[in-house]
Amino acid sequence: MNSKLKQSIVNVNKNAIVTVLGFSLVMTLSLSALAKSPILGVTLTAPQIMTVMQIKLEQAVNADQILGFKRIVTRLDLDKDGKLSFKEWAEHHSTPNSHFYKNPAGINGFFVGADLNGDDFITSDEYAWQRIITDEAKRIYFSWDKNRDRRVTQDEFLRNVVVRDKIVAESIFRRLDTNSNGELFLPEYLRVWVGWVHTGRHLGSLD
């Protein structure tokens, strides 16, 4: 084999190696970028998801509604110490006309979610915040539930959610679907949603 031919083979091999290495580098960088891309919902934080979902929280209620929430605490506060104990809260919901009648999971879930500082009491502001959060969350949930069977399938979610990017919407659905059965039930959804709202957000006085 003459020297020119040998050199040509060497050059081809070098180019092939460079091309392969270059392709590998591009693929590595692309996969790295893909894994970190917020566009795909892979690394969306809870506050980012809430922004994407266009929640309004206190901006969606007026002063009279907030006052109405606070008056509920005043009415249920049997010892008049300005806050609700779990006993007071549970006692109210032991009556047939109450929202959580015969629903101990609901009684406990609402109380724990409302107790923002973890002191085992609910203040009027804490109760108002929990109502603002859960009332909006339920309105959103039932806007997805088009056939009114009190469950939201992935198809219903993708067709009705405000998120236009399908990949982002699918990612959000998977995070809401904690038991991975392809459907969202209201308690399951609320547990995740309330946690997302609380994350990185200061829920202070509503005065």
Image: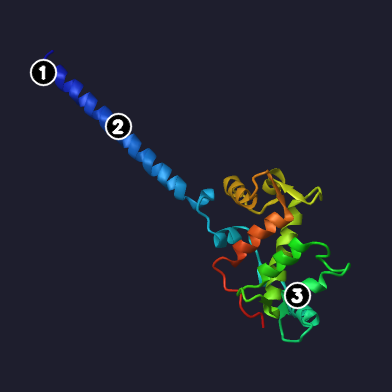
Tell me which corner region of the image, top left, top right, bottom left or bottom right, holds residue 167.
top right
Q: Which residue is mark 2?
A: 19
Tell me which corner region of the image, top left, top right, bottom left or bottom right, holds residue 5.
top left
Report, in whole angstroms, how far the alpha carbon at label 2 lies from the one at label 1: 24 Å
Q: Can you give x and y, in whole percent of width and height, for residue 103 in the image?
A: 79, 61
Circle 2 — which element? helix
Q: Is residue 131 left or right of residue 40?
A: right
Locate the C terminus and report the quarter of the image it occupies. Answer: bottom right
- Mark 3 vs mark 2: which is more N-terminal? 2
Q: Can you give x and y, in whole percent of width and height, for residue 149 in the image?
A: 81, 49
* Residue in front for this viewpoint, 92 or 1: 92
Q: Which residue is mark 3?
A: 87
Locate the N terminus and report the quarter of the image it occupies. Answer: top left
Q: Can you give x and y, in whole percent of width and height, for residue 27 in the image?
A: 38, 38
Q: Is residue 132 above or below residue 50?
A: below
- Mark 2 vs mark 1: which is more N-terminal? 1
Q: Which residue is mark 1?
A: 3
